[in-house]
Image (spheres, rainbow, N blue to C red):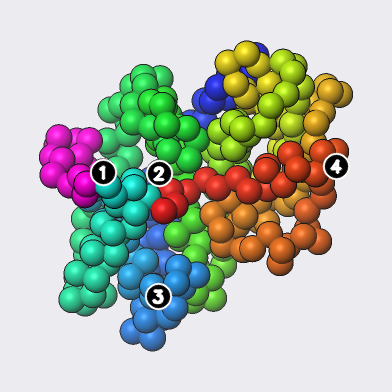
Amino acid sequence: MSPTRWGPPIDVLPLLAGEEQSLIELLGGLDPEKWGAPTACAGWTVHDLTAHILGGKLGRLSRDRDGYRTTMPRPGEAFGAFIDRLNDEWVVACRRLSPEVLFALLVDSTSQIPQLWGRSDVDELGEPVTWAGPEPAPVWLDAAREYTEYWVHQQQIREAIGAQPLDAPTWRAPVVSTFMRALPYTLRDVSARPGRQVAYNVTGASGGRWTAVSSADGWLLDDVASSGRTLASVTTDADTFWRLCTRNVRLDDVRDRVSLKGDESVGDTVLSMVSIIVS
């Protein structure tokens, strides 16, 4: 397959219901102490993070299924700051809800999200996935982005309560593949002759090899190994990769897990890649 702006499509639709069900099963057995456990999201407990997941699902259903759109950025408010504000307002409001009420609302929304995506034409262009570029993105990438957000937050809940991570390749490999779609946009300010390449290798069963190729239209993404004209090559494991992309770890703290060859400035740009919405 030839490289494209977004790389080859990712089909996460068969995974959505299973990911949701695993979260429901996890939360259903929590005691009050674990609901109040702190998570990697600064200032948020398991209760808060669950409320955030619920808010994302209800917001998606309201906007895309029901056509109900009432929230807009304030004048001069950056999109990332707007999202952060909405998230914080929602989480604070949900602190009035008991874990039992919150859990019941989450259960009620389960299955509605997979149904929504199942009715979508995933090959159409939809809203931007902002961390992968400002232009309209294919719906399959938006669905994959949403899957990764739920997966990451479930991982954070599992870590907070000491539960087994959901890291089998079935679940984690699509996250790695989706996050890699930020690579061309990350390289947007790197100038290179057409045909020059930047490689990102993720080791292990959940990983793979991706190559960004410079072209007259910007950087394009392919899911094959580089062919030799490589400006820089970065290698790390899948766990380190997703944590770097979501700022769950600092690069300085995991340097020993990262290999960089070639142009160091290009490699550092690659390692700055973020696959979440940030302020």
Q: Tell me which amino acid carries mark 4.
A: Lys
5 sits left or right of 87 in the view: right
250 sits left or right of 232 in the view: left
Residue 87 lies, in percent from the top left, at: 30, 59
Q: How many marks?
A: 4
Residue 46 lies, in percent from the top left, at: 39, 72
Quarter occupied by residue 253: bottom right
Residue 263 lies, in percent from the top left, at: 82, 38
Q: Nearer the viewer, mark 2 or mark 3?
A: 3
Characterize the local packing of mark 3: few (<14), some (14-19) or many (20 or more) Cα atoms within 10 angstroms: few
> Which type of secondary structure does the marked residue at label 4 adopt?
strand
Q: Is residue 18 visible?
A: no
Q: Nearer the viewer, mark 1 or mark 3?
A: 3
Q: In the rendered image, which residue does mark 1 sit on?
A: 60
Quarter occupied by residue 8: top right
Marks 1/4 in contact by CB < 8 Å: the verdict is: no
Q: Nearer the viewer, residue 269 or 168?
A: 269
* Gap in angstroms between the C-alphas marked 1 and 4: 41 Å
* Gap in angstroms between the C-alphas marked 2 and 3: 23 Å
Characterize the local packing of mark 2: few (<14), some (14-19) or many (20 or more) Cα atoms within 10 angstroms: some
Q: In the rendered image, which residue does mark 2 sit on?
A: 146
Residue numbers of the magenta segment: 60-75
> Which type of secondary structure does the marked residue at label 3 adopt?
loop
Q: Residue at x 19, y 36 (%)?
A: 65
Q: In the rendered image, which residue does mark 4 sit on?
A: 261
Q: Nearer the viewer, residue 125 or 150?
A: 125
